[in-house]
Every structure is written in C-alpha cells, then in structure tokens.
Image (cartoon, helix red, strand yellow):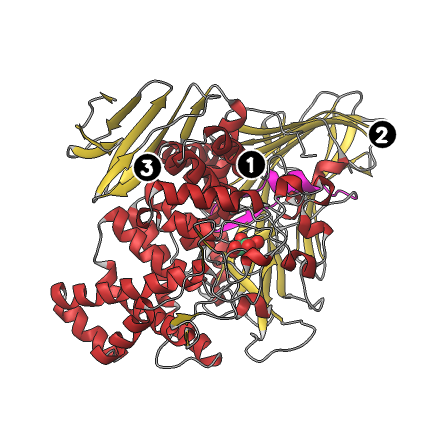
Amino acid sequence: MNQDYIIPNEWSIVEEGFDPKTVKSSESLFSIGNGAMGQRANFEEDYSGETFQGSYIAGVYYPDKTRVGWWKNGYPEYFAKVLNAPNWIGINVFVNQEKLDLNTCKEISNFRRELNMKEGWLSRSFKATLQNNIQINVVSKRFLSLQFDELGVINYSVTPINSDAEITLTSYLDGAITNEDTNWDDQFWNITDITQENHQSFIQATTMKTDFHTCTFMESRVFVDNQLVNLDCEEINSSASVSTSYTNQTKQGQTIAIHKFGGYVVDRNHDKFKLVEAAKNILKKGTDLGFEKLLELQKKSWTQIWDMADITIEGDVKAQQAIRFNIFQLNQTYLGTDASLNIGPKGFTGEKYGGSTYWDTEAYCIPFYMATKDQKVARTLLEYRYNHLEKAIENAEKLGFKNGAALYPMVTMNGEECHNEWEITFQEIHRNGAIAFAIYNYHRYTNDYSYIPEKGLEVLIAIARFWHQRATYSTDKGKYVILGVTGPNEYENNINNNWYTNYIAKWCIDYAVECLYKVADAYREDSIRILKKTKVTKAEIEKWKEVAENMFFPYSEEHKVFLQQDGFLDKDLVTVADLDQSQRPINQHWSWDRILRSPYIKQADTLQGFYFFEDHFSEEELERHYNFYEPFTVHESSLSPCVHSVQAAKLGKMDEAYTFYLRTSRLDLDDYNHEVHEGLHITSMAGTWMSIVEGFGGMRVKDNKLSFTPRIPKQWKGYSFKINFRNQVLKVNIHQNKTDFELDSGDELTILVNDKLVVVTPNDLVTV
Ligand code: BGC
C-alpha cells in the first residue's frame, strides 16, 4: 500500500493532523534547500519520538574509510559521506518550565504543515496541550534564502490560549551531530571554537580528515504581539552547543515570537580564518532586512525560477502537485552557480548514497537544466566532469588501463571513486557512456559546439581509449566482446555483453572519432593543443575503429530483439504480472542470488539504450523491445518509470505512459518504494520532467530543429511548459484537440510539429 496522507494542492505540499508514524517521511517530503545548503523538515523544538535529524552543507563531506567483507584490489580507500552538519534551527519552548515536545503532549490538534513551493517556504502550526494543562498555539515559518544562500530564517511564535503562562524560548546551535550513515561510527566534526557576542552565537567546526572549516551562526529577535522587545536573556555556552533563552510572562492570547537568523559559512567560499567575520556580515544583511523583507525576496527569486520552469496541468490536481514538487526539489538542490557542486541522488534530504555525483546527472538531469535554465548551467555540469578528467584517468590506471584511458567514478565527490562494491565500482562501467552522451546531447540541444574543442574532446578521447582497452576480441565470435559488466539494470552482475554497454561503447568511439576530425577541420588551434596533450595518433584511432566496427551485440532471432546480455533467454521468463505480488519489491524480499538468477529488470537497461539512441531504430523496433522488456521490469530504481513513460507515450500507449508518469512523479509523495523516510529521489525528479516534456509533449531535437509530437493523457484537460531553446523561450500549451506555441521574444523560430514545419514569431500565438 502506498501512503496517501499528502493533501492534493496545486502549489503546496500539505499535511493535516499529527501522526507520529509519518514524522520521518514528512521530514523528507517537506525538506528545504537553496543549492548551497539544505535540511530535512525537522521540528524546531525537541521531539523525543522517531525522527531523522539532517542539515547539510553543499560540498562538505567526510571520507569514511571503506568497510567491506573482503578487500579487493582497486577498491577506493573511502566512501564520501554527505555530512550531517551542526544544527542551527533549534528553538525549544518551555511553558511554565515544562518543555514542549509533540511526543509527550496531552493533546495535539489543528496540526498542519505546508511546503509552499510557489514562494519557497515551510510552515507548521498546531495547538498543543501540555502535561501542565496549558494549551498553546504554535506557528512557525522558515526558509533558506535564495538571495543570500548562506542564510536561513525562522519565524516561530507561541500563544498561550487558556491561561497566562511564563514562556521561555531557547534558541540554540548544536554541534554534537552524528551521521546515521557511518561505517565506523567515526566522529566527523571537530569543534574548534564556540563564541557569543552581542546576542550572536557562533560554532566553528572543522570536518575530520577533509578539514573543511565551517562556522554555524545565529542571532534572534523577539517580538511580543508584533512589537520588538528587548527581553533579558540567558546565554549558555557548553562544549558542543550554545543557546540564548528569552523569558516572558505572557498573557493569555498574547503572542511571543522569535525571528531566528542562522546558517553556515564555509571556507569553500571564505578565508578560513575569517569565518566569524563572514558570519557577522551575513547576519547583518539578514537582520537589517528582517524576516518579512527576506520573505519578499524569497518569493521574488522563486517567481523567477517558476517563470521559466513551471509546468501547469489542468484537471488533475495530484499530477499538478507532483510535477511542481519535482521541479521545486531539483531547484532546491542545484542551481548551477558553483562548478564544483553537482546533483546528489538524495540532494539535501538524507544521507543515503553518500557522494554527490552519479551517472544520474548526465543521463537524467542535464535535459531538465538545459531546457529550464540558461544553457551555461548545463555547460557547468559538463565542465564538472572535465575538471575531474585527470582523476578519472588515475582511476582507470589503478584498474590496469593505460595511455590516458579514463574511467569516471560511479560515485564521487571530488573526482575520486568512492564506491566500493566490485560489481558496481569495477563493472558498472556504462557510466562512462552517459558522460560522453551528455556532451553530444548538450551540443544537439544548444548548438554550442565550442565546448567540444575547448574541453569535451579530451574527455571523449579518454573515454574512447577506455572502451578500446576494455573490449576483448573473441575468436569464437569473430567480434569484440565486453565481459564482466553490470548494466544499468543492477539486478544482473558480472554479465557478458550487456547490449546497452556494448552499444554505448561503440557509439562513444564513433562519436570521439567524428569529433576528432571535426575539430581538426574547424578548430585548428584546439586540435593541435589536444593532439599534443593526448598524443592521439591516426594508428590509435584505427585501432579504436576496429573495435567499434566489430562490436558484438547479443540478438534473438526468435524474438527479433537485442538481448539484454548473453544468456538472457536461459532465464525462467515469468513476467512481473505473474509474480506473487506479496514478493514485491523483490529487493526487500529476495536474496541477492535469487534476484540475479531471475529475469527481473530493476530499471531501463536495453530500453535505456533505445531512449538515448532513439533515432538509430525504427518505431517498430522500439515497440518490439518495449513489449519484450517492459513485462520483466520491476522499476525498483526511481530512474526507471520515466524512461518507460517516454517510450510508452511515443508508442501511443497513453494509459501506460500516464501510469508511469504518476509513478515517477509521485514516487516520493506516495512512497511507492517504501523508503521516503530516508530522503527523496532527487535525480529521478528530472525524469519526471522528461516524461511530460519528452514523453507527452514529444519534444526532441530533429534535423537541428525543435520538434514536437504532442499527446495528452485523457485525464488532463490541458498542460503547458516552457523551454529555453538556444536562448529563446518557447511556451507550449497542449489541449485535447489543439496545441498552442508562443515565443516570448527574440527571432522567429521554425519548429516541427508532427513532422511538419511550423514558424513561430515572437508574441504571436500559433495554434496547431
Ligand atoms: C540505480 C543507479 C543510480 C543510483 C543513484 C541506483 O539504485 O540503480 O542507476 O545511479 O541508484 O540514483
């Protein structure tokens, strides 16, 4: 059973009524972030029930020493952990000296949470009766500023309802923080200094081993019935925390509120010896503006984001809520302002998946960022990999490859591999393919070729070298084979000739060769520089081509499909529909060896290849492969349903496409995979965007033109989206019987709609 307590609403995520069982799940769902930091939606006041406390700073991590059963040569020394950082949101409430704790109150009513996605804030309100029978009304609102990304603000108010009461609000910083996810229970933080001056508090802490210097800070203002008051306060400073308490004899019906300004400054952006000074600067900016003005700025920043990225859906509130939730969370995670950051599968909502970067970025996220932001954001994501090229070459060398071959890490923080399961670290090498594909995709979409001579070609050469060396010649087959791999479907390990891997390997070589010649022709200087640096020769290129031209692809004559891998047909081919449903998800019910022997596919694998290389195959071939593989696919990776949704839509199977859309878009809201308490699936959220824009809208780039094949689920009256195509913004509005196109500005744009040319001129509505 999926969860269904989130109340449908077009612009907000709403929960009503307090249920301790949903606390951890809501902490994930209501998470907030601003690209530079993020936090789970933990209560400000202490909560003694089950909770998962989490607050994270982008780019600050800990290299947790690898822990495995049997050490295998080539394993990385560490697994980078996203670090739970000191907590700055804490505000404890004492009512006649009794501490408010929602787990121990006599009664809680009118509990409501809202994550307002339009304006970018989180709020919570409730009435609580404490053991001492005093009833209070609590309202809190907080956000992490997009304008000043080191700053967050909370407005927390308490009103005694049934009598006068002494209310104490204790605002604190807590540095005694641990990770849920740790290999050896190491201490991750070293607190170096705790100070308080002029009602401001600072905890300076460094991370162990990585030595990131951080300063967590706070300052509070207190208001009684909206009037700023200067209450006496008590400041307490311990070895790991610091607090300031304000006490007020509060009349029945009177409201005491605290505006708390807090956040982090880090030596990634500041001089490590001047962090307190930097914190004071940001506090000054925050307190000068005050809560309300900061909120106005927050709304403005989100309006700008939505103006470009919003998708509207008419006639289906749950679908509308879901797509906005996905777009909102992606923007909370990554905004493209810092080239050393990337998009972690859990963003700032949990610790699972450690490192920040997977192939998810190239395979799933880049299309979203390309179309909804300035194209330099996607370029920044490509540059992230260029900046890690040397490390990817070292990584390949460690595994025995040579001559500048690169194997990009499966999981990384700083370019070093930090994943350590042999079947993934050593075998899930298809990730190299997605990195090359993203370069191609970026050029296809933006028409900006300059990235390739400047940076991309070096990456393509190193990847081509890897595939050339990784393939082996089979005299039996008279072909090149790629042995011992894991494809995107991680429910198969150590397989031979995963079709997807072999296909993308061949494509990478072909594409690298094409780019080498094009750069040699059109960018002489770059070509000379690159050839000098990489020492690529004609003879070497010929060897790559020999591999690409003679690559082996497993195929079934009987079914007329490419086989996911050698021997796939030997499996007991019982479809998912015929599987005992109580056994699902199989990864929570079956032993690993049983999963490996089964035909079940965790996520799009052969179909991932058909997604990337759609135009290499006919629609009939796509349909045959879809019909063959979909019945065995369990979609136990969040990355799966979106690809199937795009393909089902292309094949006109709109009911299936819609079901997959709901599954991908409401994956976390409805908790399909029973794990939302661990955090959200951020990277697959870009897949949700794909299933609307590429799936239903049928958006592609064909013949260097934007092309659409609009379709619409029968459940919807209409939907619309905007895309930035080569610096022009096109609005597409699809209804059951017509599609409108509108250009915001710029030059006229010729697009393809159902393969026919259509000219769209600025500020003129074109209806097809
Ligand atoms: C998927 C991978 C993905 C990773 C992070 C895994 O469950 O199988 O393809 O890269 O999650 O999202």
**On the image, numbered disc 2 is attached to which residue?**
106
Quadrant of the rendered image containing residue 153: top right
Residue 31: in magenta span? yes
Task: Give the amino acid at mark 2.
Answer: Lys
Badge 1: residue crowd in 10 Å (few <14, some 14–19, many ≥20): many
The x and y percentages for residue 53 are 67, 49
Instruction: Find the magenta span and give its range.
Output: 24-48
Residues at marks 1 and 3 touching, judged by CB atoms closer than 8 Å: no
Q: Which mark is residue 749?
A: none
- Residue, disc 1: 663
Q: Quadrant of ligand 1?
A: bottom right
Instruction: Give the CA distance from mark 1 to mark 3.
Output: 21 Å
Label 3 environment density (alpha carbons within 10 Å; few <14, some 14–19, many ≥20): some
Q: Considering depth in this image, is 349 or 148 the residue closer to the camera?
A: 349
Quadrant where the N terminus is found in the figure:
top right
The residue carrying mark 3 has its beta carbon less than 8 Å from ligand 1: no
The answer to whether marks 2 and 1 mark residues whose Cβ atoms lie closer than 8 Å is no
* Sequence-first tag of 2 and 1: 2
Q: Hey, what amino acid is under mark 3?
A: Met
Give the structural element (helix, strand or loop) at label 3: loop
Q: Measuring 62% from the left and 43% from the top, which residue is drawn there?
A: 576
Q: Is residue 119 left or right of residue 217?
A: left
Amino acid of disc 1: Arg
Location of mark 3 (residue): 699
Q: Is residue 57 visible?
A: no
Q: Pinpoint residue 485: horizontal percent, then vertical percent.
A: 51, 67
